[in-house]
Image: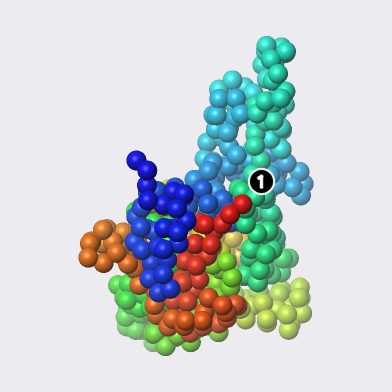
Amino acid sequence: MIGKYRGNRQAVSALVRETEIHRDLYVDRELFELEMEHLFANTWVYVGHDSQVPKIGDYYATTIGTQPVVMVRDGESSVQVLYNRCPHKGTRLTGEACGNTGRFFRCPYHAWTFRLDGSLAGIPLKAGYDGTGFTDGHAARGMTPVRHVHNYRGFVFGKLSDVGPGFEEFFGESLSSIDNMVDRSPEGKLEVAGGPLRYMHACNWKMLVDNLTDTCHPMIAHQSSAGTTVDVWKSAPPGTKKPMAVEIYAPFASSYEFFQGMGIRVWDNGHGHTGVAHSIHSDYSAVPGYFERMVAAYGEERAKAILGETRHNTVYFPNFTVKGPIQLVRLFKPIAADKTLVESWAFRLVGAPDMLLERTVMYNRLVNAPTSVVGHDDLEVYERAQSGLSANGNEWVNVQRLYAPDEAERHNVTTDGTSEWQMRNQFRTWVKFMTMSP
Ligand SMILES: [Fe+2]
């Protein structure tokens, strides 16, 4: 069946209006396929952190959009990203896992081998290809590298197509959120702390991205979790030391005024962040010895500036988000129009006291884990939205809050913390990269 949207840029553009979005962005299978072909090919998509592959031969198999790729350490300071496909019969060289492959990838089907840069190293019974023109074909070129790869302070991104801007131009000032997370290490270095928490969501990936700057929902959707925490804490005997879990949960129950005042910064190409003035991460207890190590590393003024940034969620459009003050990142892996795998990765600040990692890991468990009591509040509303969108009579999703008619022409602005400007920014960017010409 020929769909409505393939080859019809006008129809795709018409789905995003100034203040409303057509439901097909969340439910239509053809649009999902087109997102994989255009949006997830023309933008820089997060692959992984280079500390996941510390030793030569270490690899990590993942996806860019729905494309299977493998990140591999092929030199002391060099990481490759290759399509995870044997050029012989198409077999994946590795499962979706990590490990060390030694000096070569070896296909489990016919034992063709490849160097860590993907080039073909050996084939059993090679003489059988003599005189066949083999060296001129695709197979002789080995595993195909992803067209564009950039390692920014340990964070590895890939861009599948030649369409779209270069790395620096695409991210611009938004890289300051990655900078801040790395700078929080007295040694300027992050290390991934174990594997991710994986949480399957029966909803479209964009619902999670929309939610990152949706500050009108925490006090409602998280009433049952954060609100209950606050109530229980109120009845604690006087003098009780505030548990770390209460420090983490309670800010989710903050007032509209709190979120209004925090502000949202909006950057070009769909990037932005909540928590400009303050955030839910602002009032955590000091960790003994940490500030002193930061001052020793950076000087007092710079240390205060680094720790004074308490950005909440930074959106790296399309599907990556960073939480610097708590050293967590999340990746929303699109699986289908109504299926998304959420990965939440914790990081250790090299040279910082262990208690920071303890807080990071606790936050990840309490908020992002499949067993959390915050994350499933969100999942419940996403799944209700995913099924509610099939209701007829209104095909549009509203993103009108604090809309200003001239906002598409304005750049790098800070808005009211309850504005949906950043969501509109994401959808304008969605159209831009979905309809971009080579
Ligand atoms: Fe939420």
At horizontal 52% and vertical 36% (from top left) the residue drawn is 95
At horizontal 59% and vertical 20% (from top left) the residue drawn is 110
Task: Tell me the kind of residue under disc 1.
Answer: Arg
Q: Is residue 200 above or below residue 16?
A: above
Query: Observer-nearest residue: 431 or 160?
Result: 431
- Quadrant of the image occupied by residue 111: top right
Query: Observer-nearest residue: 372 or 45?
Result: 45
Query: Observer-nearest residue: 83 or 59?
Result: 83
Q: Is mark 1 within 8 Å of ligand 1?
A: no
Q: Quadrant of the N terminus?
A: top left
x and y, in percent, of residue 8 in the image: 45, 53
x and y, in percent, of residue 231 in the image: 32, 80
x and y, in percent, of residue 50 in the image: 66, 52
Query: Observer-nearest residue: 88 or 332?
Result: 88
- Quadrant of the image occupied by residue 287: bottom right
Check disc 1 and report the residue beneath it. Answer: 147
Q: Is residue 363 above or below residue 256?
A: above
Is 341 positioned to the left or the right of 86 in the image?
A: left
